[in-house]
Amino acid sequence: MSEKELRRSLSVLPIGTVMKLTDLTARQIRYYEEQGLVSPERNEGNRRMYSLNDIDRILEVKDFLSEGLNIADIQAVLAKREAKRKQEQATLAKSISDDEARRLLQDEFLHLGGLSDNDNPFNNPI
DNA sequence: GTTCTGACA
DNA sequence: TGTCAGCA
């Protein structure tokens, strides 16, 4: 996870700030959580703490709602997005392992002997 | 002062 | 959803 993503996922905003940023009431924000649409963390005093990602999601939920979608619809959209996220993550992991395999294969060839760096078939900077 | 849970209209 | 109670 990049540092940028890390910062966006830090839960540092109390519900009062979220109210101002989203123009929603505390009642509505808590209701979204009750419906599993957002999952803010809790601090030592059981106070909800939201991240910038949470803000984005809340604003999105607000939009969906104003467009006529019901809670179930939004839960479905969010679930689908999560599935896609996991799949892309899996794809990324696979490409990394392929890259690693390529590097290992390259090392193997280099150590096979007699192969100069110029003749290295893996050394082509396209 | 702010937020929390539960409850009622 | 708004609002009120009673806490922390």
Image: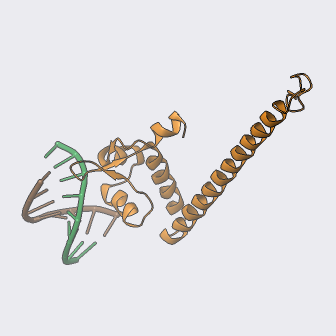
Chain colours: A orange, B green, C brown
- Looking at the picture, tell me which residue is in the foreground, A45 or A109: A109
Res. A26 image quadrant = bottom left
Rendered location of residue A112, percent (x, y): 85, 33
How many numbered marks are there?
Answer: 0
- Looking at the picture, tell me which residue is in the foreground, A11 or A64: A11
Q: Is residue A80 left or right of residue A94?
A: left
Q: Is residue B3 left or right of residue A78?
A: left
- Name of the residue lying farthest toward the right: A119
- Looking at the picture, tell me which residue is in the foreground, A37 or A63: A37
Q: Is residue A123 above or below residue A61?
A: above
Q: Residue at x 40, y 61 (%)?
A: A32
- Looking at the picture, tell me which residue is in the foreground, A118 or A47: A118
Q: Residue at x 51, y 66 (%)?
A: A75
Q: Is residue A109 left or right of residue A49?
A: right
Rendered location of residue A115, percent (x, y): 89, 27
Q: Is residue A115 above or below residue B4?
A: above
Q: Is residue A13 left or right of residue A57?
A: left
- Name of the residue lying farthest toward the front: A113
Res. C7 image quadrant = bottom left
Q: Residue at x 45, y 61 (%)?
A: A37
Rendered location of residue A81, percent (x, y): 60, 59
Q: Residue at x 92, y 26 (%)?
A: A119
User: Which quarter of the figure is the C terminus of chain A placed in?
Assistant: top right
User: Which quarter of the figure is the N terminus of chain A placed in?
Assistant: top right
